[in-house]
Image (cartoon, helix red, strand yellow):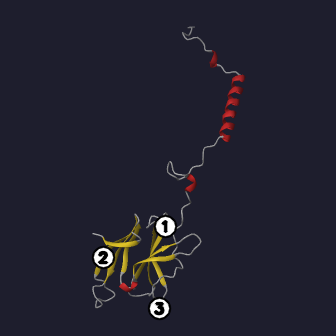
C-alpha cells in the first residue's frame, strides 16, 4: 500500500463538539437577524422624504355624474373613459366621452374632464367638446398628460346626420391653467 504524500488533516473529521458550536453560531445569527430588520421599502426615489409619499389616488368614476348634456327623455351614456394626471398635480383626472342614448342615428358626443378631491363626488371641470358642436368622437385616448381624439363632424347643417364629412385629429394639453387644443398632423 502506498502512503499519501499529503498528511492526513485533523479538521477532516468532525467531532460532536464542532457540530454543537456550529449550531450555536447559526442560532445566534438567526436570532440577531430577527431583531435587526431593514427599513420598510417605499416607492420613493432615493433621497426623497419617505414620510411625504402618499398612497395612489383613484381616478374619478364617471358613473352617476350629472354631465352638462341635454338628452331630453333619454339618459346620458358614457361611451368611453380614460384617466391620467393631466395637470401635473399628482391626482388623476378622468376624461369621459358622453352622448345621449338615443338608440338610433348618430347623436353628438361631449368630452368632459372630471376631477375629484378626497371626500367629494366627481365633478366636471372642463368641456373639451360640446355636444352643441354636433361632433362624434373616435380614436380617443389619454396618455402622456394629453387627451387625443378624432372628431367627426359636418361642414354645414345641410349634411345629413348619418354621414359626417369633416374629420379632425386633435389633442388637448393643460397649459397655463386651461386645456389648449391643437391639431395633430
Residue at (48, 74) in percent of width and height = 114
Residue located 69% across and 37% down the image = 31
Mark toward the start of the polypeptide (1 vs 2): 1
Q: Which residue is mark 1?
A: 92
- The nearer-to-camera label among 3 and 1 is 1
* Residue toward you, 123 or 51: 51
The front one of 99 and 131 is: 131
Question: On the image, numbered disc 2 is attached to which residue?
Answer: 168
Q: Residue beneath label 3, please?
A: 72
x and y, in percent, of residue 53 in the image: 55, 56
Q: Label 1, label 2: how many angstroms apart (C-alpha)? A: 26 Å
Residue 183 coordinates in the image, percent (x, y): 30, 72
Q: Earlier in the sequence, mark 3 or mark 2?
A: 3
Q: Quadrant of residue 88?
A: bottom left
Secondary structure beneath dot 3 equals loop
| Horizontal arrangement in the rendering, residue 37 relative to residue 102 (left or right) | right
Image quarter hosting the C terminus: bottom left
Amino acid at each position: 500500500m502506498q502512503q499519501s504524500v499529503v498528511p492526513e488533516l485533523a479538521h477532516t473529521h468532525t467531532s460532536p463538539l464542532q457540530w454543537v458550536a456550529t449550531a450555536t453560531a447559526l442560532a445566534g445569527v438567526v436570532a440577531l437577524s430577527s431583531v435587526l430588520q431593514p427599513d420598510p421599502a417605499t416607492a420613493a426615489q432615493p433621497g426623497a422624504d419617505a414620510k411625504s409619499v402618499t398612497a395612489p389616488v383613484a381616478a374619478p368614476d364617471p358613473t352617476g355624474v350629472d354631465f352638462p348634456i341635454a338628452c331630453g327623455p333619454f339618459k346620458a351614456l358614457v361611451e368611453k373613459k380614460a384617466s391620467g394626471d393631466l395637470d401635473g398635480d399628482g391626482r388623476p383626472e378622468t376624461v369621459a366621452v358622453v352622448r345621449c342614448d338615443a338608440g338610433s342615428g348618430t347623436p353628438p358626443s361631449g368630452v368632459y374632464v372630471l376631477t375629484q378631491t378626497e371626500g367629494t363626488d366627481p365633478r366636471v371641470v372642463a368641456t373639451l367638446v360640446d355636444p352643441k358642436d354636433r361632433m362624434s368622437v373616435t380614436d380617443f385616448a389619454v396618455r402622456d398628460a394629453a387627451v387625443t381624439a378624432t372628431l367627426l363632424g359636418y361642414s354645414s347643417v345641410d349634411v345629413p346626420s348619418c354621414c359626417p364629412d369633416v374629420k379632425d385629429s386633435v389633442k388637448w394639453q393643460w397649459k397655463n391653467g386651461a386645456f389648449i387644443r391643437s391639431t395633430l398632423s
